[in-house]
Amino acid sequence: MTPDDSYSPRVQLNLNARGLPQSATLAINERCAAMRREGRSVFRMGLGQSPFPVPEPVVEALRANSHQKDYLPVKGLPELRQAIVDYLHRHEGLSFSADHVLVGPGTKELMFIVQLVYYGDLVIPTPSWVSYAPQAHIIGRHLRWLPTHPETGLGVTPEALDALCRVDPDRPRLLILNSPGNPTGSAYAVEQLQAIAEVARRYRVLVLSDEIYSGLHFEGKHVSIARFYPEGTIISNGLSKWCGAGGWRLGALAFPRSLTWLLEPMASVASETFTSTSAPIQYAAVRAFEGGPEIEHYLTQCRRILRAIAHYTWESVRAVGAVATEPKGGFYLFPNFDPLRERLASRGITTSEQLCLHLLEDTGVACLPGEAFGRPLDELSVRLALVDFDGQKALEAAESLPEGTDPDNEFLRRHCGDVVEAVDRLCAWVS
Ligand code: GLU
C-alpha cells in the first residue's frame, strides 16, 4: 500500500485558480519538446525566447560571482539598483533614485505583485501578452480590454483610453503599455506616447510600461512613456530579452517618488514571498546594465539579424494575403489571415486555435493563436516568435557583414535556416 491509497483529499481550490490552464507560452514549449522527443521535427515559433547567447562579459560576471550566497536586500543589490538607475538615465534621460528600484525574479512576478497591491482595474489593449490578463483573473481584478486598430499598430490609442475613462473618471486604473510590443512587434511613436500620456494624466491612470524589449528596438531608438508622464509611470525591464537571459529570471521596476506609496507595500509583499532575487544573478546583472562597447556591439548585431528576419516574415505573410503591422522591434509578428477565411474554412479552420493545431500537424510549425492574446476566437490571427535559429552562429556570421548593411535573404537562409524554412512552410500551407 502506498501512502496515497489511504488518503482521500477534500478538493478545495481557490475559485480564481479553478480551471486555470498553464500559460500558453510555456505550454507550447513543453508540447514542442514532447513532439521532438517522439522524433517529430518541430519549428519552435511558440515561446518567445531569445535565440542569442548572454553577452560574454555578463557570463563572465556570473562566473566570478558564483560564490555569492547570502540573502540580498529585498529591493535588490544596491549596486544593481544604481546600475539600473544609471541605465535609465543614459537611455531615457530620466532620474530615478536607487531606493526606488525593486528587483525581482523576472518582471512577470513583479507585475503580478503590482496587480496584487494596486487596487484598480487592469486596462490592456487587445492583443496583449498572454499573462497580463490571467494575472488579473488570479488576483480578482476587473479587466478592461481596449479596442485597437491595425493602422495604429494594434496598440493603445488615446481615444480608446479616453472613452473608457470618461465613463467613470475617478475609478482607479492600471494601464500596461508594452513597447516594442508582444505579440505585434510594433513600437509606439513619440506622438502616440505623448497623446496617451496626456489622457493618463487627465484621469490619473497608473501606467506600467513594459520595456522588456527596449534594447531590441530595431533602430536602437526606444522611447519610454515615462518621459512624458514621469509621475505616473513605473518602468519595467530585465535581462530576459535584450540580454538573452530568460532563464536567469531577473527583472526590475523603477518607480518615481510620487509612487512610493505603492513601492513600499510591494517590497513588503516581496519580503513575504520571494525574499530576494538570486545573488549571483544580481551581481552579473550589474555588468549587463553597465553596458559599454562590447554589449552595445552585441545589441547592434542582434538587432540587425532580428530586423532582417522580421522583415522577411512580414513581406512573406503579406505576399500570401495576410494583414500584419510593420515590426519595429523584438522578435514577434502577429499576422491576421482573415482575408483567407473562405479558403481556410473549406479546410475546416474557423478559429485561431484550429489554425495553429492544423498548422502544427501539417507542417511542424508551432505558434500561438491570437485568442491567447485576447483576440476574438474566430479571428484567424497567430503570433510567430521568430527565434528558431542558433543565435551564436548567426552573430558570428554577422561579423563579416559590411557595416550598415542588413543581412540579405541568402544570409538568413544560411544562418537562420529554421526560421526561414518555418515561414516558407507556413506561407505555402496557407496558400
Ligand atoms: N515572454 C515570452 C513569450 O511571450 C515567454 C516568457 C513567459 O511567457 O513567461 O513568449
Image: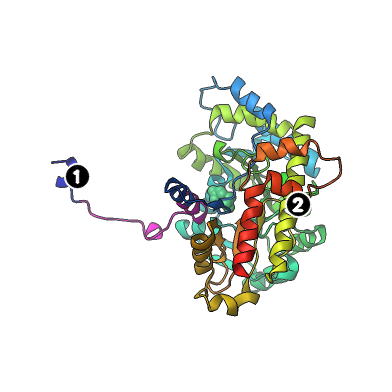
Q: Residue at x 58, y 45 (%)?
A: 107
User: Callout 1, which amino acid?
Assistant: Asp
**Can residue 208 be seen in this snapshot?**
no
Q: Determine whether the residue tagged by mark 2 lies in a helix, strand or loop.
A: helix
Which residue: 79% across, 44% down?
Answer: 92
Q: Quadrant of the N terminus?
A: top left
CA separation, marks 2 and 1?
58 Å
Question: Which one is nearer the viewer's eye here, 171 or 190?
Answer: 190
Q: Is residue 291 above or below residue 420?
A: above
Label 1 within 8 A of ligand 1 by Cβ: no
Q: How is the image coloured?
A: rainbow
Residue 411 percent across, percent down from the top left: 75, 46
Residue at the disc numbered 1: 4
Q: Residues within 10 Å of mark 2 (few under 14, many from 20)?
A: some
As helix, strand or loop, the secondary structure at mark 1 comes to: helix
Q: Is mark 2 within 8 Å of ligand 1?
A: no
Sooner in the amino-acid sequence: mark 2 or mark 1: 1
Where residue 195 sits in the image (x, y, percent)? 78, 63
- Residue 176 in the image: state x and y as whole percent: 63, 57
Point 68% across, 34% down: residue: 98
Q: Position of residue 27 (x, y in %)?
A: 47, 53
> Residue sitting at 72 percent across and 64 percent down?
325
Give the mark toward the camera: 2 or 1: 2
Q: Is residue 416 shown to the viewer in this render? A: yes
Residue segment shown in magenta = 9-31
